[in-house]
Amino acid sequence: MNTPRISRHRSRFVAAVAGLVLAVAGGNAVADDEPIDVINSAVDALNTGLQGQRDTLAQDRAALIRFVDGLLAPRFDRNYAGRLVLARHWRDATTEQKKRFIDGLYNSLIRRYADGVLEFEEDLVEVLEPRAGDNDEKRATVRTVVTIGGGETVPVNYGLVNRGDNGWKVFDVTIEGISYVRNFRAEIDEEVKRTSLDAVITRLETEAAEALGELDESDVSAATASGS
């Protein structure tokens, strides 16, 4: 199966937006928040968090990963996202494999996209009012538009799931029509069929470890504690 790809000359932007997406999933939402409130407050929180420490984070990988994880962990439903990505293979996976896959996918995402957070600028993100049919009691879509170089705009939409007293949590992001969940599901499915689930899990864990390879053991433990 051929997974949709974004053109190579836009790859740097996509990494930046994906980093933004990860961080925007953070914030201190409450149960009474509407989905759009979760995203609006998260954009504000990210902007505030970057003030005065952007240069420091750019030069301190451990601090950057802790920063992104601190924003992402409270509001990203990584269990639900991991189950959707693993799809048909979830049923046959053991409890240990499920946990390792979820953790490996989460930490691999941070590895891939953390640097993009540093390119975030609040005035380049517009959160749009919901359309009819965007929201129901269980799921919602929050649509945003991100302005890139030359004034070009790109749609970046967030899928959220209602977790009751725990509020709305992000589980999917769609950039230019390409869903994170669908994209990863296709990639993982092909790889599991070609190798094995254990091999996929090991790759994800290795990618995360390599991203932290320059850090000492205490930094690695601190940087991944809330994602493990």
Image: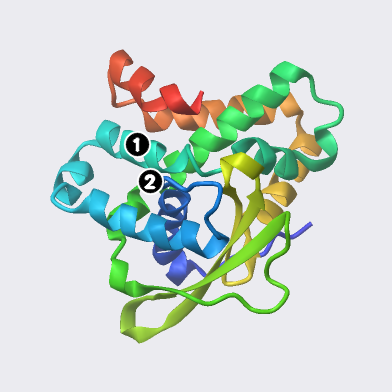
> Which element type, helix, strand or loop, lies under badge 1?
helix
- The numbered dot on residue 65 is 1
List x then y, in percent, for residue 165. Answer: 61, 40
Left or right, residue 69 beside residue 62: right
In the image, what residue type sits under mark 2? Answer: Ala
List x then y, in percent, for residue 102. Answer: 63, 31
Query: Looking at the image, which is closer to me, 226 or 161?
Result: 161
Q: Dot 2 surroundings within 10 Å: few (below 14), some, or many (20 or more)?
A: many
Dividing the picture into quadrants, the one containing residue 173 is bottom right
In the image, what residue type sits under mark 1? Answer: Ile
- Residue beneath the point at 73% across and 38% down: 83
Query: Looking at the image, which is closer to me, 125 or 97?
Result: 125
Q: CA distance from mark 2 to mark 1?
A: 7 Å
Left or right, residue 47 beside residue 226: left
Q: Is residue 201 above or below residue 95?
A: below
Picture quarter with the N terminus? bottom right
List x then y, in percent, for residue 121. Answer: 28, 66
- Residue beneath the point at 58% across and 36% down: 105
Residue furthest bottom in the image: 151
- The numbered dot on residue 114 is 2
Q: Dot 1 surroundings within 10 Å: few (below 14), some, or many (20 or more)?
A: many
- The numbered dot on residue 158 is none
> Which element type, helix, strand or loop, lies under badge 2?
helix
Residue furthest top in the image: 217
Asked if disc 2 and disc 1 are in contact, CB closer than 8 Å, the reply is yes
Q: Is residue 29 above or below residue 204?
A: below
